[in-house]
Amino acid sequence: MLDKGDSVDKIREGSKQNLLKNAFELQGRFSATADVASMYVLVSNKYIRPGINKMEALAAMNDDDFERGKEEFRDWCDSAAEDIVRITDGEQSKMAENLTRNVEVLKQNLPDQKGKVFLVTGASGGLGKLLVDILYRHNGKVYLAARSQSKTEEVIQEIKSAHPSSTGKLHFLHLELDDLSTIKPAATRFLEKESRLDVLWNNAGVMIPPEGSKTKQGYELQYGVNNIAHFLFTLLLRPALEAAAASAPKNSVRVVWVASSAADAAPNPAVDLTNMDYHREEGAWMKYSRSKAASVIHSAEFARRTKGTGIISLALNPGNFVTNLQQNMSKMELAMFKLISSDPINGAYTELFAGLSDTITEENNGGWVSPFGKVEKIRKDFVEPELGSKFWDWTVEQVKPYM
């Protein structure tokens, strides 16, 4: 936790990145979770400049004024609720317009996916389930990688019943991303059944789990599930991706790393290789941000290391949605999060755009897709080769015993 002086210096830098970072780190200065949730919403939404100004003013206060300023900020958050809703509604209108311009074209003209093989992690709920529904509706063969067979089989039957005329296929693939020992068996089962993989969506994730949550191997849960396990899974499936690329249309074979807007909250460097075990404590939100930024870095490095194979690697921000991912949020955090949330189907179409749009080319390899189906410039430090290489090597060392 930063003391006030450190936070003031960093917030004064004025960048969105540092504002977000310090919103999380200032959590300990406030007694109510609502305060940090409010700050997160205010500073992460580019249309809410007053919130950023309030943050800067608060950080600049001396110790005598800070307690008074803290209460004023709380009062302002309460009084600004209607403005926040109005402004975020305006943003959603802009986002919906963007959806019409980009994803809507793909939505209306998505070709038959017969003969293609897809794999979606975290497919038993949330955006993953919605994505599988679209792929199956268009006759694709989809592997639903998830922990619970019973839950996933229910999803499979639900989707099949909704689209009785589909000639696609749905298969459950057991995968527990919090246990690296299950990753290779899952990849092996897939490779025994399929010789190709057209698109891999690394979609599954966890967000703000209970404090101290770890994987079976002892990694911080968000890093382990969101990043390290997906990294290993992708490496093991690379032969099937390359096999598909040898015969598939150019630029159509892809790995999609589902990140988040929270990746932008990670500091620079986004990955601290001296603190991967968090012996220097950081807040839960910052850990989430780092785990998502780490996947963006891996996506860019995977693109560099597979250049010339025909595989396209993309990271994306699907948007903000209320799904099972937010199950560990407090009621107030969830209420605030809903202010910047959209219909989950829009996120599924953003993932679909990254995986299937024919507007994606080699030029976009290692790049960033934002809501809803827009290719944008990626944060420069995320694609910095030295960090990408070092982090790749570190991750390889972690997963070697399980390859």
Image (cartoon, rainbow, N blue to C red):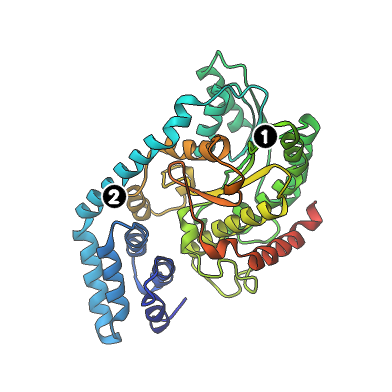
Q: Quick check: 19 above or below 344?
A: below
Question: What is the three-letter code of the residue carrying label 1?
Answer: Asp
User: Can the viewer see residue 7?
Assistant: yes
Say few, some or many: other residues with alpha carbon within 10 Å of mark 1 (under 14 / 14 to 19 / 20 or more).
Answer: many
Question: What is the three-letter code of the residue carrying label 2?
Answer: Thr
Q: Measuring 48% from the left and 31% from the top, which residue is drawn there?
A: 106
Q: Where is residue 32 in the image (x, y as percent from the top left)?
A: 34, 65
Q: Position of residue 266 (x, y in %)?
A: 50, 65
Q: Quick check: 194 above or below 235?
A: above
Q: Which of marks 2 and 1 is nearer the N terminus?
A: 2
Q: Nearer the viewer, mark 2 or mark 1?
A: 1
Determine which residue is flagged by label 1. 198
Q: Quick check: 92 above or below 153?
A: below
Residue situated in front as seen by the camera: 95 or 304: 304
Say few, some or many: other residues with alpha carbon within 10 Å of mark 2 (under 14 / 14 to 19 / 20 or more).
Answer: many
Determine which residue is flagged by label 2. 88
Residue situated in front as seen by the camera: 106 or 40: 106
Residue situated in front as seen by the camera: 291 or 33: 291
Q: What element carries label 2?
A: helix
Q: Measuring 25% from the left and 54% from the top, which residue is drawn there?
A: 84
Q: Quick check: 98 above or below 2?
A: above
Outermost residue, top side: 165
Q: Is mark 1 on a helix, strand or loop?
A: loop
The label on residue 260 is none
Mark 2 in CB contact with mark 1 (< 8 angstroms): no
Quadrant housing residue 101: top left
Cα gap from disc 2 to disc 1, whole angstroms: 37 Å
Q: Where is residue 87 in the image (x, y as percent from the top left)?
A: 25, 51
User: Can the viewer see residue 146?
Assistant: no
Q: Measuring 57% from the left and 24% from the top, which residue is drawn there?
A: 136
